[in-house]
Amino acid sequence: MDQTKKVLCRVLMASLLVAAYFGKTCYIHRSYQEDIAKRVLRFHVLANSDSEEDQALKLKVRDAVGSYMAPKMKEASDVEDCERIVEENMQKITAAAEEVIREEGYDYTVTAQLGDAKFPVKTYGAYTFPAGTYEALNLVIGAGEGHNWWCVMYPNMCFSGEEYEVVDREAKEALEQALTPEEYASLMENKNYEVSFKYLTFLNKDR
């Protein structure tokens, strides 16, 4: 009975330590996410549906908007400046998307606006952005019921020539300038936390 009590106590202590560890970790990274979200602008494209045709159309719309906005993003000095540039070009962004949709033979409506959106964990090169709510340029094609495409519009991790989701030197430098050292470092940490019981040596059976 004493041995059983010892095992139960050890399990309870381990559970409390694990809960405390994850609680602290989640709090820290939720705090980082909220602060990072204030300094970046994301880009969010929602396809009409998950059909192969609608998903292909989503990427063509992305390409058109990317070709139009990429040079303009170079003018942004901070996230507020980026928001201003997007707002000033909103009609042309919508027009670029609509042109592609018509050329592809569809009559879907398209809406573009700045607003909050929920994003999952997303990795760009060495940087992993935590899941959470971010402000984004939200582009909705038709019913907007298909899988999304998303990236970071400021600093520009969306468009680099004909490539997408590429973190070039300029993007790295802009990101480092936009964030605090702690926030910047948090993006390069591994978010797939694992609990290793080798550090909880008291769980080992008495020898």
Image: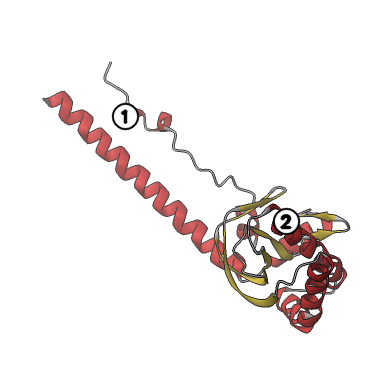
Query: Badge 2, how many Cα within 10 Å: few under 14, some, many 20+?
Result: few
Where's residue 204, x and y in %?
32, 24
At x 28% / y 39%, what residue is drawn? 13
Front-lying residue, 141 or 43: 141
The local secondary structure at tag 1 comes to helix
Front-lying residue, 82 or 19: 82
Q: Do the residues labelled 2 and 1 touch (CB within 8 Å)?
A: no
Give the residue number, with chain letter if any, for mark 2: 53
Q: Which of marks 2 and 1 is in front?
A: 2
Q: In which quarter of the image is residue 205?
A: top left
- For marks 2 and 1, the one nearer the N-term is 2
Q: Quadrant of residue 69?
A: bottom right
Amino acid at pointer 1: Phe
At x 63% / y 60%, what residue is drawn? 49
Q: Is residue 75 visible?
A: yes
Where's residue 173, x and y in %?
78, 60
Q: In this view, does 101 lie above or below 165?
A: below
Give the residue at the far left of this rendering.
1
Amino acid at pointer 2: Glu
Where's residue 7, x and y in %?
22, 29
Front-lying residue, 106 or 169: 106
Q: Can residue 157 be seen in this view?
A: no
Give the residue number, with chain letter if any, for mark 1: 202
Say which mark, if any, is on residue 22. none
Residue 195 appears left or right of 169: left
Q: In this view, does 119 lie above or below 110?
A: above
At x 81% / y 71%, what residue is drawn? 102
